[in-house]
Amino acid sequence: MYRILLELSGHEVFVAENGVLGLEILKTARPDIALVDIGLPGMDGYEVARRFRAESDGDRIFLVALTGYGSSADRDRSRQAGFDLHLLKPVDPEALKSLLDERA
């Protein structure tokens, strides 16, 4: 759903089915913003963020955690992993569109 919404709004979208592919896309496509699901198979979103932020220019991309985990401990964990923003699913489509338009 998010992919379709973003493409219809004019954004270029890359999709990865797991954390390993997601990290590769971050390294090669270098998007301005990355929406990363925490519950990815293989390598979770926390590890994707940690590994990407460890790169020499890993702070250039605005990382957004998309998750169903919303406790204060979950928010702290995403911040410590390197996420800039923590959003709970389901994310309001208009709020997401506004965020991306604002950051673009």
Image (spheres, rainbow, N blue to C red):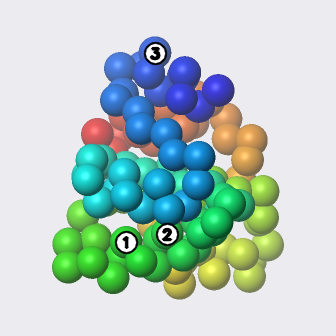
Quarter of the figure that contains the C terminus: top left
Judge whether 73 appears above or below 62 on screen: below
Judge whether 12 appears above or below 15 on screen: above
Q: What x and y, as percent, mark residue 35?
A: 50, 50
Quarter-wise, where is residue 103 in the image?
top left
Q: CA distance from mark 3 to mark 1?
A: 28 Å
Circles 2 and 1: CB atoms closer than 8 Å? yes
Q: CA distance from mark 2 to mark 3?
A: 27 Å
Which label's residue is closer to the chain start, 3 or 1? 3
Q: What x and y, as percent, mark residue 83?
A: 48, 69
Q: Nearer the viewer, mark 2 or mark 3?
A: 2
Quarter-wise, where is residue 38 in the image?
bottom right
Residue 8 badge: 3
Quarter-wise, where is residue 37 in the image?
bottom right
Say what amino acid the circle numbered 1 marks. Answer: Phe
Q: Which residue is mark 1?
A: 52
Q: Nearer the viewer, mark 3 or mark 1?
A: 1
Left or right of residue 104, residue 95 in this image: right
Which residue shows up at 42% across the image and 61% down it? 23
Q: In the structure shown, which secondary structural element does the residue marked by tag 2 occupy? A: helix
Which residue shows up at 36% across the image and 51% down it? 25
Quarter of the figure that contains the N terminus: top right
